């Protein structure tokens, strides 16, 4: 979809409908996931377009992470990892409460597949580069990160991500 088409889509007022579908607990999870993906795609790279849509991508991500539904949580983890690289999103995601569900999902090895765990750890790594997030991550995830960095039965990538997060945390200015 080109940018002009996206702008027209937003100008037509699609934001409230997508937002409503994202939060409708009675809606089909696939519809909710698709609505959230489209909402985030439309608001990506355009603060003006995000303002027209009427809600923040970060709020939707945290809602997905807290949804208690496998598909929606998975989409939330992917979105958090993606948004976590954007400097203006890092602190806001943590302020809105993304850490608790990320740590819960990262700690639960039976609920999600390994790809989701890697994306969860990637999200934490991305968020941990901001000094404002380092103390909250330490408070909520330190024991988990130490355990994951030293468990030889975990995939090397998980151990490497956990070690990277710990390295970022150790660089806190205080």
Image (spheres, helix red, strand yellow):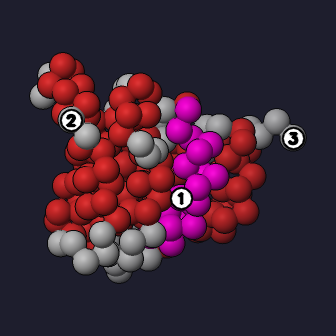
Work out whether mark 2 precedes mark 3 in sequence or the reverse, and give the earlier one.
2
Q: Closer to the N terminus: mark 3 or mark 1? A: 1
Q: Is residue 122 visible?
A: no
Q: Which residue is drawn at 24% across and 25% down?
A: 7
Question: Which residue, given by chain and number where applicable, does mark 2 sit on?
Answer: 12
The disc placed on residue 174 is 3
Is 132 left or right of 62, judged from the image as shown? right
> In the image, is residue 104 part of the stretch drawn in magenta?
yes
- Asked if the residue under mark 3 is in contact with the one under mark 2, i.e. CB atoms within 8 Å, the reply is no
The Cα atoms of the two marked residues, 3 and 1, are separated by: 23 Å
Local packing at callout 2 (Cα closer than 10 Å; few below 14, some 14-19, many 20+) is few
Res. 96 visible in picture: yes
Are the residues tagged 1 and 2 within 8 Å (C-beta)? Answer: no
| Residue bounds of the magenta highlight | 88-105
Depicted 66 relative to depicted 81: above or below: below
Q: Mark 1 points at which residue?
A: 98
User: Is 140 on the left or on the right of 104, as rendered?
Assistant: right
User: Which numbered disc, 2 or 3, marks the residue closer to the eye?
Assistant: 2
Residue 125: which numbered mark, if any? Answer: none
| Nearest-to-viewer mark from 3 and 1 | 1
Splitting the image into 4 quarters, where does residue 14 fall? top left
- Could you say whether the residue bearing mark 3 is in a helix, strand or loop? loop
The quarter holding residue 140 reads: bottom right
Distance from disc 2 to disc 3, alpha carbons, whole Å, reads 48 Å
Point out the tag, 1 or 2, that comes first from the N-terminus. 2
Query: Residue 34's spot in the image, x, y percent?
Result: 19, 55
> Measuring 61% from the left and 37% from the top, which residue is drawn there?
129
Q: Can you say which quadrant of the picture contains the N terminus?
A: top left
Q: How crowded is mark 3: few (under 14 residues within 10 Å), some or many (20 or more)?
A: few
């Amino acid at each position: 979809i080109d940018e002009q088409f996206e702008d027209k889509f937003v100008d037509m007022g699609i934001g409230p409908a997508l937002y409503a579908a994202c939060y409708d607990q009675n809606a089909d999870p696939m519809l909710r996931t698709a609505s959230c993906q489209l909402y985030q795609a439309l608001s990506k790279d355009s603060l003006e377009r995000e303002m027209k849509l009427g809600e923040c991508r970060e709020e939707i991500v945290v809602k997905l992470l807290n949804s208690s539904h496998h598909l929606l949580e998975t989409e939330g983890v992917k979105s958090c990892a993606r948004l976590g690289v954007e400097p203006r999103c890092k602190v806001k995601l943590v302020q809105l409460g993304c850490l608790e569900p990320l740590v819960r999902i990262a700690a639960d090895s039976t609920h999600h597949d390994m790809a989701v765990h890697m994306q969860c750890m990637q999200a934490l790594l991305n968020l941990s580069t901001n000094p404002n997030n380092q103390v909250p991550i330490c408070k909520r995830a330190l024991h988990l990160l130490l355990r994951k960095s030293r468990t030889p039965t975990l995939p090397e990538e998980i151990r490497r991500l956990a070690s990277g997060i710990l390295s970022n945390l150790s660089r806190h200015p205080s």
